[in-house]
Amino acid sequence: MSEMRSENINQEKLTELKNRLGCTFCSDGIFAEMSLDLADYREKTHAIDEVDYRFFRGSESEIKRAVALVDEEWIQYFDKDQSIFCGYKEGQIVSFCTIEVEKDCILSTGGINVGAVGCVGTLPQYRDLGIGLRMVDLATLFLKNAGCDKAYIHYTHIDKWYEKLGYQTFARFSFR
């Protein structure tokens, strides 16, 4: 297990998170909370042939169909009011994530503008091609360019994957 990053955590938000999820924060937790300082962040991945990335502008049913192919429980997080960033191949969604600028979270303390990338998914037939990692890289750059000081990844079990972009675990939790 990687060494944990030190972060200034909003204790009120941490208590809310524990109560909402019903979880216990512990050093051997299965799930990770991750962050990345954006001041010096630079693009880490390369363009992928025939895949382009942009904010989603289609119908709610279109994005929900794609999300259902990855995780049906995530459908609730994708609606018309959410900023959704997608990877497209031949005009079809192949990956997606949510993006939030000015995220109110456990990292929200004294003047720090936090952005978040969440519900990252790639359709099964397009996995292991770098499409999802490229999308998160570009989403992270978007957060930096939008004025965020930090990027936040909440509730993940694939922390090693996010570490490829420089994200670091600052807390772990489990449901016990």
Image: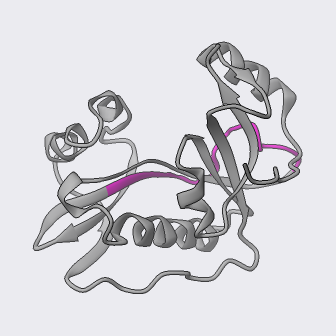
The answer to whether 125 is drawn above or below residue 25 in the figure is below
Of all residues shown, which one is farthest toward the front?
1
Residue plotted at (68% across, 50% down): 34
**Residue 97, image x, y percentages:** 39, 53
Residue plotted at (53% across, 59% down): 161
Residue 126 quadrant: bottom left
The answer to whether 163 is drawn above or below residue 59 in the figure is below
Examine the structure image and report whether residue 39 is included in the region drawn in magenta: no
Report the number of discs.
Answer: 0
28 sits left or right of 67 in the view:
right
62 sits left or right of 159 in the view:
left
- Which of these two is toward me, 52 or 103? 52
Q: Main secondary structure of the magenta part?
A: loop
Which of the image's four quarters has the C terminus?
A: top right
Residue plotted at (32% across, 69% down): 54
Residue 11 quadrant: top right
Examine the structure image and report whether residue 109 is included in the region drawn in magenta: yes
**Residue 63, image x, y percentages:** 21, 47
User: What colouring method underlies this structural image?
Assistant: one colour
123 sits left or right of 85 in the view:
left
**Residue 155, image x, y percentages:** 57, 37
Residue 105 quadrant: top right
The residues colored magenta run 96-110
**Residue 123, image x, y percentages:** 23, 53
